[in-house]
């Protein structure tokens, strides 16, 4: 029999730093423990001596980092006796909420924007059996409605305004420090609602002290770089945006809920916000697939688009150790991926050895 401890999810792993006790029923799908992959070809391609690691959160059970927050939020909702959860979502929160509700045996209601949800996310949410409420309006409108309805119906909000979501998500920073043995110099993230940048910063701060003695174990924390899509960049504008627009639907948000926390992360870490066009985001998206074999969502690639830009300009100096979070799996949004590829409609040839051989020899 194996003596190795079975991996049971991030709540078990980081129990001493999360709000659970011995009697809490943990609702888990063995989330977390995602790979931190060092990029090998892209640094060489850009001719810079930097260590870039990607934290591939697309390998969580429902394919995004939202699972980290959802295991905590649903665990605490069930502990409090809640029979139903609700969220507004650009897709990934609804997929995660639906899955963890199914696991817990409670109901999930999800408000999604009309038409702007990636195909994979919709398929998941339908399969996990959530009640889908599609609204005539964008994410921000859905979020406002969810906050209102939770005051009038017995449902627990599991958007990232739920503090347990942030607590679950902060464990990604713990994993990075555990794996590298130190905090990176820079941490780059796509920013939408800004829950994740809030969570990472909280995680890095907490992990620099011992959980039992609260004594400092290290002074090192990363500089936080929050990157947005050009058409949905309230942190760059310095104010909320009413009609956010970007192909990266997961960050198509104009009224971020974690506004103050994200500004605190930027200021305390000495970091910055910046914005990138859909073209720059899609270029990084394709680069990761074609040069590293890592297929993430368009929104996720915003972290690398930003890092590459800031490495190129020297804002992030050579010799730096950089972590980019890849927030979701590329399979979530097959339509955007296919539309980027010229070979999506390959020419058809005769089914013969000769014809196939000719194609191969032509390519080499
Ligand atoms: C939710 C999400 C984001 C944005 O995270 P926030 O916490 O809202 O800033 C980015 N990428 C993907 C794939 C997401 O699902």
Image (cartoon, rainbow, N blue to C red):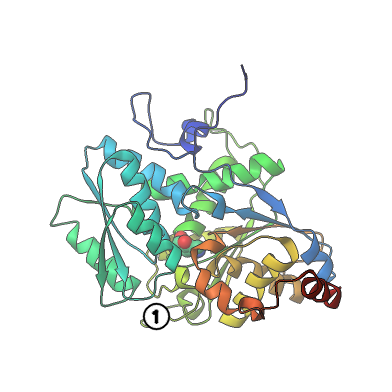
Q: Nearer the viewer, residue 151 or 364?
A: 364
User: Quick check: 229 above or below 173?
Assistant: below
- Point out the image quarter for the C terminus: bottom right
Residue 266 quadrant: bottom right
Numbered-mark total: 1
Judge whether residue 137 can be spotted in this image. yes
At x 44% / y 58%, what residue is drawn?
A: 195
Q: Name the residue under label 1.
A: 241
The local secondary structure at tag 1 comes to loop
**3 or 344, which lies in front?**
344
Residue 162, given in percent of the width and then of the height, sits at 34, 52
Indicate the quadrant where residue 54 lies: bottom right
Q: Which residue lies furthest to the front in this view?
A: 352
- Judge whether residue 159 can be spotted in this image: no
Residue drawn 53% across and 73% down? 228
Residue placed farthest to the top in the image? 1
Residue 213 vertical placement versus 60 (above, below): above
The answer to whether 32 is drawn above or below residue 147 in the figure is: above
Q: Residue at x 50, y 49 (%)?
A: 202
Residue 276, given in percent of the width and then of the height, sits at 59, 78
Going by the picture, which residue comes out furthest to the left?
152
Q: Residue 210 location, x and y as percent? A: 57, 33
Is 361 left, or right, of 146 in this rendering? right
Q: In the image, is residue 230 above or below residue 6?
A: below
User: Which quarter of the rendered picture does the N terminus lie within?
Assistant: top right
């Amino acid at each position: 029999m194996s003596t190795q401890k079975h991996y049971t999810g991030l709540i078990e792993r980081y129990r001493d730093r999360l709000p659970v006790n011995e009697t809490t029923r943990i609702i888990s799908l063995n989330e977390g423990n995602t790979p931190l992959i060092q990029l090998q070809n892209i640094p060489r391609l850009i001719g810079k001596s930097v260590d870039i690691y990607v934290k591939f959160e697309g390998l969580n059970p429902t394919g995004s980092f939202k699972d980290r927050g959802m295991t905590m939020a649903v665990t605490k909702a069930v502990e409090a006796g809640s029979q139903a959860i609700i969220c507004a979502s650009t897709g990934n929160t609804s997929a995660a909420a639906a899955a963890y509700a199914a696991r817990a045996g409670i109901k999930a209601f999800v408000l999604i924007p009309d038409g702007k949800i990636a195909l994979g996310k919709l398929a998941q949410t339908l399969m996990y059996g959530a009640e889908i409420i599609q609204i005539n309006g964008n994410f921000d409108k859905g979020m406002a409605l969810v906050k209102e309805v939770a005051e009038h119906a017995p449902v627990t909000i599991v958007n990232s305004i739920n503090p347990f979501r942030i607590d679950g998500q902060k464990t990604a920073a713990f994993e990075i420090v555990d794996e590298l043995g130190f905090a990176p110099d820079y941490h780059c993230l796509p920013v939408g609602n800004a829950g994740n940048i809030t969570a990472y910063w909280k995680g890095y701060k907490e992990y620099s002290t011992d959980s039992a003695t609260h004594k400092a174990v290290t002074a090192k924390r990363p500089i936080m770089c929050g990157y947005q899509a050009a058409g949905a960049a309230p942190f760059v504008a310095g104010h909320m945006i009413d009609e956010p627009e970007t192909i990266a639907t997961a960050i198509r948000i104009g009224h971020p809920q974690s506004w103050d926390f994200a500004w605190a992360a930027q200021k305390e870490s000495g970091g910055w916000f910046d914005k990138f066009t859909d073209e720059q985001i899609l270029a990084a998206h394709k680069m990761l697939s074609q040069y590293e074999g890592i297929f993430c969502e368009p929104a996720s690639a915003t972290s690398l688009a930003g890092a590459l830009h800031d490495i190129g300009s020297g804002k992030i100096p050579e010799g730096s150790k950089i972590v980019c979070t890849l927030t979701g799996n590329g399979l979530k949004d097959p339509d955007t991926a296919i539309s980027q590829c010229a070979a999506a409609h390959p020419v058809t040839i005769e089914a013969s050895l000769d014809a196939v051989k000719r194609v191969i020899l032509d390519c080499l």
